[in-house]
Image (cartoon, rainbow, N blue to C red):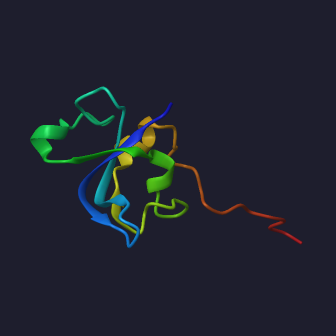
Amino acid sequence: MRAAVAATDSWRDPDGFRAPAGEVHAWTPGTNQTLCGIPIKKAGLHRFSHVEWADAQPATGRDADRVTRVCHRCAAATGRRRDDKPWRRVDPRP
């Protein structure tokens, strides 16, 4: 699934690139709501059709410098599971 980003705020980097800030939600271009069901216009969210969902993740994304919160319902809708861990156990008992 290709999801873009809708965010509560935006900022411009020194090169003039518009990037998301604040809370981010996943959004499918061509629809009027986020994947978690929030209407974009009524909630006052900014659309970022040029930024993919993976690029707005604070842990790994290149466009996540000012992202403060990622919607957990949107993350689940794009395939991230609650029990996914950022670490992996290697030989716990030597």
x then y, percent, for residue 26: 37, 42
Using the image as rendered, state which of residue 5 and residue 68 is in the foreground. Answer: 5
Question: Residue 21 location, x and y as percent?
Answer: 30, 62
Q: Residue 89: image x %, image y %? A: 74, 63
Q: What residue is shown at x 61% (from left), y 60% (from top)?
A: 86
Q: Residue at x 37, y 49 (%)?
A: 72
- 89, above or below 49, in the image: below
14 relative to 8 in the view: left or right: right
- 30 is higher (above) or lower (below) than 20: above
The percent coordinates of residue 69 (x first, y second) are 33, 61
Question: Which residue sits at x=59%, y=57%?
Answer: 85
**Quarter of the view holding residue 75:** top left
The residue sitting at the left extreme is 42
Question: Which residue lies at the image location 52% right of the left edge and 64% below the top edge?
Answer: 59
Front residue of this view, candidates 19 and 22: 19
Left or right of 52 in this view: 41: left
- Of residues 88 and 13, which is closer to you in this image? 13
Residue farthest toward the top in the current orientation of the protein: 30
Q: Look at the picture and state if 18 lies above or below 49.
A: below
